[in-house]
Amino acid sequence: MEKGVQRWAVDISKWDPTPQDFSFALSLLPLHDHNSVIRFVRSEDRKRALVSRLLQYALVHEVLGISIDEIVIKRTLEGKPYLEYGEIVTEFPNFNFNTSHHGDYVAIASDPLCLVGLDIVSPVIPWKETVIDFIYNFSTYFSSFEWDNIVAAGTCDDILIEFYRYWSLKEAYVKAIGSGITHGLDKVEFHHRSWFNISIKTAGRVMPEWRFWLSELGKGHLVSVARGHPKSAVESYKRTLKHVEFEEDEYHKGLHLPNVEFNFQTVEQLVQVLCKAVYSIPRTPNTGTLCRRKRINTDLESEITEALDREEELA
């Protein structure tokens, strides 16, 4: 099952696409994903949205070996992406994934059996706001134990980083279960030993069926990964999973699979993977993939160019 444990990340600060580059990359995605990318006004937000979807399709294609035209990725009401299995058969009992983006990075994590949650943070504060003022806006999302650790961390920089560590772990957890960002953050409490051996409590009870990892991701970024039991998922996400109940031995094996290091990809590598996958699809009346994607390319390029012009006018 170890092949199902994947951690990929892209540094989008190194990608400065022309409208033609952007539209070509976007054309590799299904049409229903396009509006979710180009609806953003800021170019950086469009880049994050595009790269997030490139990661999802490339990872599913590479790991599961599914033809690109058979991959259907949808979202729950709470916004968590999931693979619609349909008739797809995989070697993994419960393959699922989660994405995150913040600052310079966009990343994806997958697991073959357990729920997986991912969260990236870049410890910054809004302009003209002090660290203390900023973190107090979120004080209700932390237990008294966590809050005491945050405010006693040391310098303002130390406090900010400590805040983001806890915040990232909390978001990784709620994203794993599919409940939506910030929902229930105050209901969970994290304990750790120098940010290793991280454990979680809910209602004062330790939850041994969960594991967490916190690490640096490039310069100035932190990333948290959560792994836990599928029975913990909210109902809307639970319905998307292949299996929810597992024998204890089988679940224990999935829970204790190695948490692999992040594999740093470039956008060009993702485009190459998807381009090869897309253009290897036979031209049939049912797919029409090549003709359709080439036809929309010019329209996309014009739309993206117009969006960039609007952004410059607003700047």
Image (tube, rainbow, N blue to C red):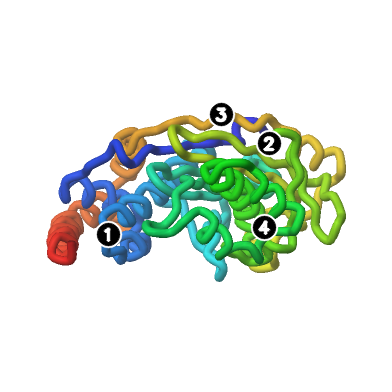
Q: Amino acid at mark 2?
A: Trp
> Alpha carbon of mark 2 to alpha carbon of mark 1: how far?
35 Å
Sequence-wise, the earlier of marks 3 and 1 is 1
Kind of residue indicated by mark 3 = Glu
Single out the mark in the foreground, 3 or 2.
2
Sequence-wise first label, 1 or 4? 1
SS under mark 1: loop
Drawn side of residue 168 relative to residue 298, left or right: right
Q: Which mark is residue 134?
A: none
Instruction: Provide the secondary structure element on which disc 4 rests.
Output: helix
Give coordinates of residue 95: x percent, y percent.
62, 46
Give the quadrant of the N terminus. top right
Left or right for 12, reference 148: left
The residue at the far front in this view is 155
Residue 110 in view of the camera: no
Q: Which of the pair 115/89 is nearer the observer?
A: 115
Residues at marks 2 and 4, CA–CA distance in whole angstroms:
22 Å
The quarter of the picture where residue 249 lies is top right
Residue occupied by mark 4 = 177
Closer to us: 72 or 108: 108
Residue on which disc 1 sits: 42
Q: CA distance from mark 3 to mark 2?
A: 17 Å
Q: Is residue 88 left or right of residue 255?
A: left
Image coordinates for residue 152, horizontal then vertical, percent: 67, 46
Q: Which residue is label 3 attached to?
A: 261
Residue at the (16%, 56%) spot, across then down: 301
Which amino acid type is shown beneath numbered disc 4? Ile
The mark that comes first in sequence, 3 or 4, is 4
Dot in front, 3 or 1: 1
